[in-house]
Amino acid sequence: QVQLVESGGGLVQAGGSLRLSCRASGSIYRINTMGWYRQAPGKQRELVAGITKGGSTNYAEAVKGRFTISRDNAKSTATLQMNNLKPEDTAVYYCQCSDVIFPKNYWGQGTQVTVSS
């Protein structure tokens, strides 16, 4: 099993920045890709950004050019740098990773990001 713990959420004004961090523990050798998802009230959870072990990244169109995902494999951490935040970025953000052995995902508990206009 892999455990994920997020930190770094909070309240920020539009145009501001936040940095989310995710630390993995447990069976970290099982971690394949890592990613950040978000879920706004009344909406489905959606992918924000993902990163492979080798560092290849992908982003949702809505955050391209504003968010940057990175990971440190040695420290089993993933980071989401969010710049030029907009009110529509308000959501609970979840760290996720996939299992390299089985078709399984692990999730963190989520961290709230609120962007005021």
Image (spheres, helix red, strand yellow):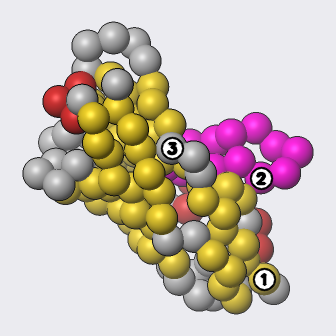
Left or right of 67, for residue 63: right
On the image, the x and y values in percent for residue 46 come to 64, 41
- Could you classify mark 1 by the number of other residues whose Cα lies within 10 Å: few (under 14), some (14-19), or many (20 or more)? some
Q: Main secondary structure of the magenta part?
A: strand
Mark 3 and mark 1 in contact? Answer it, CB < 8 Å.
Answer: no
For this orientation, the residue located farthest to the left is 74
Q: Distance between the residues labelled 2 and 3?
A: 16 Å
Could you tell me if residue 89 is visible in this image? no
Q: Quick check: is 1 in the magenta stretch? A: no
User: What is the secondary structure assignment of the residue under circle 3?
Assistant: loop
The label nearer to you, 2 versus 3, is 3
Kind of residue at badge 2: Ala
**Upstream in the sequence, badge 2 or badge 3?**
2
Q: Residue at x 48, y 65 (%)?
A: 7
Residue that numbered label 2 is attached to: 40
User: What is the secondary structure assignment of the residue under circle 1?
Assistant: strand
Part of the protein shown in magenta: 35-49
Residue that numbered label 1 is attached to: 116
Kind of residue at badge 1: Ser
Left or right of 39, for residue 30: left
On the image, the x and y values in percent for residue 76 come to 23, 49
Mark seen at residue 108:
3
Mark 2 and mark 3 in contact? Answer it, CB < 8 Å.
Answer: no
- Could you classify mark 2 by the number of other residues whose Cα lies within 10 Å: few (under 14), some (14-19), or many (20 or more)? some
